[in-house]
């Protein structure tokens, strides 16, 4: 009995190590080109929603709104627009984490005219996955209509950008997705994790639908 228990514990330990080893936060880099005090390259976590520009870059200027700083309601309610002027750089909205889903923040920023959203973490911690809402909230209609890219930055960088903006400095940024490609030939790998029960409702339904839709193309291109 003791030998069987020891064997099961070893199997469980190995499985845990394997699972934890596969848990990867997808990241890209952002490059701050101004102000001088913040120039450099930083890591950020890619949102699991919206449209990251894999293989490309996006240049813009960062804005931290004076109201609705968590972006949990529409910016039209606070009479704020992020639409860039003709000839101007696209606007990246900086929002604080908390109080609502990350997807809702992105949706509100998009409707306000932003070209991308940066969410500043409210905790000192490693970067986490910006995922879609779970279960009953996963089928919210707006989630499928998010088209702007999103990224999570750490608390220190978020605070540094806020300080620069409060000092009247212009913060310009280059979001770079070229390094997030597993192969530097503009291909994107897609992994789907599922199980024999598939009881996660809307999210699993969307995965199954994706597999059905991509089957023909996968056979043609031998994915």
Image (tube, rainbow, N blue to C red):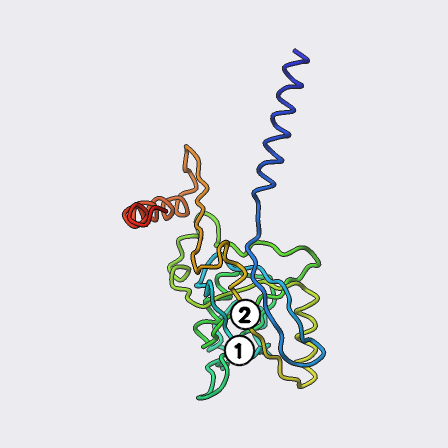
* Mark 1 in CB contact with mark 2 (< 8 angstroms): yes
Q: Residue 60 carries which label?
A: 1
141 relative to 164, above or below: above
Crowd band around label 2 with a 10 angstrom C-alpha radius: few (<14), some (14–19), many (20+) = many
The location of residue 45, given as percent across then percent down, is: 57, 59
The image quadrant that residue 95 belongs to is: bottom right
Residue bearing the label numbered 2: 175
Q: Residue at x 69, y 81 (%)?
A: 36
Q: Which residue is drawn at 43% across and 50% down?
A: 190
Q: Residue 7 carries which label?
A: none
The location of residue 192, given as percent across then percent down, is: 43, 44
The location of residue 114, given as percent across then percent down, is: 48, 75
Structural distance between the alpha carbons of marks 1 and 2: 8 Å
24 sits to left or right of 133 = right
Q: Residue at x 63, y 15 (%)?
A: 4
Residue that protrudes farthest toward the front in the picture: 185
The location of residue 59, given as percent across then percent down, is: 52, 76
Q: Quadrant of the N terminus?
A: top right
Question: In front here: 49 or 21?
Answer: 21
6 relative to 202, above or below: above
Crowd band around label 1 with a 10 angstrom C-alpha radius: few (<14), some (14–19), many (20+) = many
SS category of the residue bearing label 1: strand
First reached walking from the N terminus: tag 1 or tag 2 = 1
Q: Which residue is drawn at 35% across and 44% down?
A: 208
């Amino acid at each position: 009995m003791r030998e069987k228990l020891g064997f099961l514990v070893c199997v469980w330990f190995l499985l845990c190590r394997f699972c934890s080893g596969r848990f990867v936060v997808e990241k890209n880099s952002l490059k701050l080109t101004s102000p001088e005090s913040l120039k450099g390259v930083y890591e950020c976590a890619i949102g699991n929603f919206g449209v990251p520009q894999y293989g490309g870059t996006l240049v813009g200027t960062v804005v931290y709104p004076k109201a609705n700083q968590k972006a949990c309601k529409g910016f039209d309610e606070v009479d704020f627009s992020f639409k860039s002027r003709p000839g101007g750089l696209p606007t990246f909205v900086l929002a604080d984490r908390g109080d609502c889903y990350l997807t809702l923040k992105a949706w509100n920023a998009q409707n306000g005219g932003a070209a991308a959203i940066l969410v500043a973490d409210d905790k000192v911690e490693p970067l986490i996955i910006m995922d879609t809402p779970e279960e009953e909230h996963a089928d919210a209609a707006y989630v499928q209509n998010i088209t702007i890219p999103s990224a999570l930055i750490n608390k220190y960088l978020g605070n540094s950008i806020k300080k620069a903006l409060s000092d009247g400095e212009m913060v310009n940024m280059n979001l770079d997705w070229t390094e997030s490609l597993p192969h530097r030939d503009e291909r994107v790998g897609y992994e789907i994790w599922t199980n024999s029960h598939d009881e996660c409702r809307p999210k699993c339904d969307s995965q199954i639908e994706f597999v059905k839709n991509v089957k023909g193309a996968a056979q043609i291109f031998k994915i």
